[in-house]
Structure formats: C-alpha cells, structure tokens
Image (tube, rainbow, N blue to C red):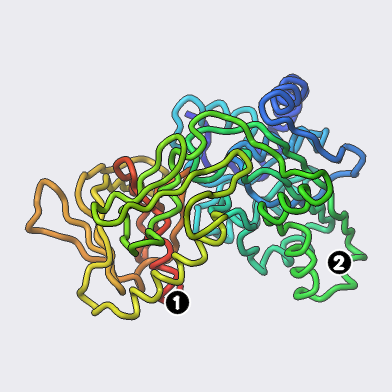
Amino acid sequence: MPNLNPTAEERLENRPRHRRFWRFAHPIARLFAKLRYNYSYDDLSGIEPPYLLVCNHVLNLDPVLVGVAMGRQGYFVATENLLHLGIVTKLLMRYLCPIIIQKGNVSLRSLREILKTIAGGASVALFPEGDRSFDGLTGPIPPATAKIARKAGKLVCVRFEGGYLTYPRWATTQRRGRLHLHLLGVYDADAMAAMSDDELASVIDRDLHEDAYARQAQIAAAEGAPVRFRGRHLALGMESTLFICPACGGVSTLRSDDAGIRCTDPGCGFSARYTEEGYLEGGRFRTITEWDAWQRGELERIIKESGPNDPLFSDHVTLERYDADHNLTSSTPGTLTAFAFFVQFTPDASPDEPVCVGLDQVVGVGIFLRNTLIAHVGKPVKHFEVRGDRGFNALKYRYVYKAVGK
C-alpha cells in the first residue's frame, strides 16, 4: 500500500524516481493530448523552477496537460477522491505523488506541503477553483491563493481555452474541437511585493477567468464561425448540471439523450437540442451559462418561499462514509432529502429511522467527477460521499448549501 499522505520531505526524497517516470511519460502524454484533444499550448519549459503554477480547472486530465506544457517534472495538487481508485491510486502515488487535499475543505497541512515542496526546488501546479466548471465560467478563486503565491516566491498563471466544451462537466463523453493552454503571466517575488494581497488576487482572477461562450463568440467574430466540438452522445448527462425545467419549473424532471434534453412531466413537453458548437436550440436559453444562472436564482426563491420542514427535493442514493485514512467504512442505500436548513437521510433498511443533519453542521461540500456529492460534517469531521442513481444531480444540493450562507 502506498503512502497516501506523504510529507514534502518524502516526496522530494523520491523525486529521482518521479523524474525518470516523467521523462518516459512526457512524449507519450504529449502525443496523446494532441490526438485526443487537438491540444496546443504555450511552451512553459523556459520558465526557471521552482514556482507555483495556477490554472483554471476544466478537465479531469488537467494535470497531465499542464505537465506537457511545463516541459519539466513537477507536482500537482489533487483531491482525496483520487485515493479511491485502487491500483490506479498506487501507481499515481508511486510515480507522481500528488499533494492531497480534501475537496471542499482545504487543510493547513496541505498548504504547508505545497510551500515545502516548492522550497525544496520542485514546481507545483494548483487548480485553485478546486472544482471543474459546471456552467462554462471559471469559478471563484479563493483569496488565500494570492498569499500562497507570495510565499512561494514565484507565480505562473496559465489558462485553458476551449476546455469546457471539449469535455463539459456534465458530459459522459469527450469531444474534439480546439483546446489551448495560454500563458498569461510570470510574477516573481519583486513583482508580487509591489502588489497588495487584493491586487495580486485580482491579477490571478483576471488571468484565470474564462467564459466558454464568450470565447466561442470571439472566435466566430474572428473566423466566421465558432469551433465545432465533435463527438458521440453530445447531450447525454446534461441533467447532471441542469435540474429545473425552464418551461414548467419542475425540479429534477429533466432527462437527456444523445441529442438534447427534455422535461419528463407529462403536462410540460419542453425539449431543447444541443449543438456541436455547445449551444442550445428550441428552448428559453441559448447557453448552459444562462440556464444555470437562472435555475440557481429559482432555487433560492423556492428556498425562501418554503417552510423549514417543507422538502425541496429528494433522490435515491448510496451514502458512503470514509475514515480519516481514506478507507471506506460503510455503504448504505437510502433516500436523501433536502430542506431549507437541513438534509435528511432515510436508509432503505430502516425507513423509520431517518438521520437529520443541519446545514450549519456541514463544514465543506464538493462534487467529484460529474455528480458524486462530497460532504464533510461535524467536529471531529466525518467524511461522506453520496452517489445517486441515473439522472442524479449533486449540484442542486451544493446550491442549497451555498444559498443559506455557506
């Protein structure tokens, strides 16, 4: 069993092995990225390490793609869910040794490991959003990112362009269009010293910000047409992001197929088609960005108008609990129900014994891959993963958590 929580000293001690693997894997990864994603990049190999590299997060393989552009061996920051992949986990920890953090709950230890690794002479790639985009926009960048960069001593800002539509967060398949990694800036200690924390944070926000649909419009204006992202099953999985019907207002009534998305309410009849350019046809909204912004506002309205004991929505799920060493300790099927200020889990095996958790007891929420809900609850913290049936949407639970002030 590999060490699932190595220290920076242990990581750096094994760096010769990591470098040998990088030299072997780099040309293979470069060819793979070009063929699979039509990937191009600004060459980062001339930037002298060590440094902290920050980048927007658009694909599960972002660390591989950034590593191709870096042209040198380095380390990346990954969530603890990477430790639940069996033999893949063992290989990753042996040859890449990422710095592990909890999704939705970054610890001081993880931050120290990042800085110690950089101090030891290795570069570290960080995706500060902590999550891939659901709507085509770069997510919020924690203000603490600027402080980490300042302590690291050297900051490199890069941005993926075309990544969201290459593999939308909700999608079950990738598509091939145009994916580029753009170098925005290199800031040394002197440059950062000339900026306040707020100014440095604004620079990072600016450099990492990407709007998938604004990028398509920009390309269309320059080239006469937006990029086409070709693939199979283009619309399948859209209900992982979209959960309120724009026609009837039904929650969790949407279902997707290869071509588009529709409402399953017998009295509605709403449907929209998804195009290779990433747009929607036949509905109220033309982009995922617009639809998601609207449904988030609608959910906040529903919460305000609901009584404290009125259920908002529910799903049949499997609730998994993990201990502090990332070991699975229990897996229980049941029904998860959201209310305005708490969630309730009712096990299938004991329906008369529901468990309620106030949202004020939840210390962190994240989403892994398309729709696995991650929750860190209580003190001492208990770690849970929630996996739903087909059509499950984890995003709406996170939106409820955020809507009540988290």
Q: Secondary structure at mark 1?
A: loop
| Camera-nearest label, 1 or 2 | 1
Residue in view at x 85 percent, y 44 percent: 49
In this view, the residue in front, 355 or 4, is 355
Q: Quadrant of residue 162?
A: top right
Query: Looking at the picture, how far across and down is residue 54, in whole percent?
Result: 73, 52
Among the 4 quarters of the image, the one containing residue 252 = bottom left
Q: Is residue 385 visible?
A: no
Report the label total.
2
Question: Residue furthest toward the left?
Answer: 352
At 40% across and 74% down in the image, what residue appears? Answer: 300
Viewer-side residue, 382 vs 365: 365
Mark 1 residue type? Gly
Question: Residue 272 location, x and y as percent?
Answer: 45, 48
The residue lying toward the viewer, choosing from 257 and 357, is 257
The numbered mark, 1 or 2, whose residue comes first in the sequence reads 2
Image position, residue 221 (x, y; %): 80, 51
Establish if 141 lies above or below 234.
below
Question: Amino acid under label 2?
Answer: Met
How would you rate the neighbour count of disc 1 (Cα within 10 Å): few for under 14, some for 14-19, many for 20 or more?
Answer: few
Q: Which disc number belongs to residue 405?
A: 1
Q: What residue is disc 2 on?
A: 192
Would residue 3 be visible to someone looking at this image? yes
Cα–Cα span, label 1 and label 2: 32 Å
Give how far across and how far down residue 264 sits, in percent: 29, 49
Q: Is residue 63 above or below residue 134?
A: above
Q: Mark 2: which secondary structure?
A: helix
Identify the residue at horizontal 63%, vertical 39% (top origin).
166
| Residue 199 in which image quadrant | bottom right
